[in-house]
Image (cartoon, helix red, strand yellow):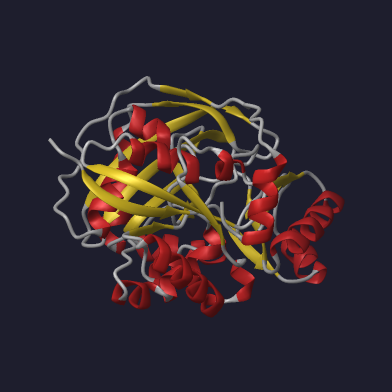
Amino acid sequence: MSRTKITVAVTGLNNIDSPGPGIPVIRGIKESEEFNARIIGLAYEHLEPGIYMSELVDKTYMIPYPSKGKEALYDRLMEIHKKENIDVIIPNFDAELFSFIKLENQLNKVGIKTFLPTLEQFEERHKSNLPAYGKKYGVDIPQGTEVFSIADLNNALKSMEYPVMVKGKYYDAYKAYSEEQAIAYFHKMSAKWGLPVILQEFIDGTEVNVIALGDGKGNLTAAVPMRKQYITDKGKAWGGITIEDQSLLDLAHKIVSQSKWRGGMELELIRSANGKLYILEINPRIPAWVYLAVGAGQNIPEALIKLALGNDVKPYTRYDVGKMFIRYSYDMIVDIDRFSTLATSGEL
């Protein structure tokens, strides 16, 4: 069967100790049986490793930070589109999704497809909105509150037991065992990600995750559950294994069907000692461990492209249990000329 030629632009090329999803997404696309994809990398930093992985990324362009606003992003994407004729864009960072969601109609008019959650879906699963989310959809959420100041923090801590989780608006979470630690983490999170900072009840139990793909009509196109086996000091999975757990799949199905979720998502969950499942976070995009799902038989990046293009997608019904992923570091040797070209021209 001949594969369809397409051009796919992908963000999230920072394959570091807190990796972006871009490289594993690209690996899934490269293994597609339906698409022969030219990959355009969209980078924010000149040292994102994926830029220099020429076996995976055919061409890279620098794009403006999300803080520059959606107009600056759109103008840059149009410059790139004129050269590359992009078919699909897959954004992979929480912080950039707002701009891409707002630009979806404009991009669609020039022939660039995306497959993203609606603005309502994106907003209602924010960490600060999770308690309301739990009530709306009938799922269990740890007690939590958003704090905007040290006064808010001290007030909230009065009604909570230690340890507590202190979470950034977009990323990062720390366990605080005292008021002093909580204050220190508040300053760290607010400086890095802005306000509010999220204060959340700590649930003792086993961490599990589910990667899922919704078709926007309430159907669960793909879902693979995983248990973290090795966790870094940043809380990132450096190793994991697919598990057989119908309750995790049922929860993913419940959320996708009720919310009519559109696009990729990750459920970060904890199973308490009594077996209760709590949702810690809902990440509104494909997670960095997506290649485990590909290896277990569900090529989620390929399915997302099909959905973006309006193709029929048959939902995955099985995956291989007991498949493991183990991350590793790898030193690339790159000529300074390539870095200089990227720095001066904004493309490589």
Q: Is residue 202 visible?
A: yes
Q: What residue sits 27% from the left and 62% below the top?
A: 260
Figure quadrant of the N terminus: top left
Picture quadrant of residue 117: bottom left
Q: Hey, which residue is sitting farthest right in the picture?
A: 180
Left or right placement of residue 109 versus residue 287 in this view: left
Picture quadrant of residue 31: top left
Q: Is residue 141 above or below residue 296?
A: below
Q: What residue sits 70% from the left and 35% below the top?
A: 233
Measuring from the top left, give residue 173's x and y in whole percent.
66, 48
Q: Is residue 226 above or below residue 180?
A: above
Q: How many marks?
A: 0
Q: Is residue 248 visible?
A: no
Measuring from the top left, give residue 127's x and y in whole percent.
55, 60
Measuring from the top left, give residue 75's x and y in whole percent.
50, 76
Measuring from the top left, give residue 105's x and y in whole percent.
33, 77
Left or right placement of residue 165 versus residue 347 in this view: right
Residue in front for this viewpoint, 131 or 40: 40
Residue in front for this viewpoint, 67 or 217: 67
Q: What residue sits 66% from the left and 50% below the top?
A: 172
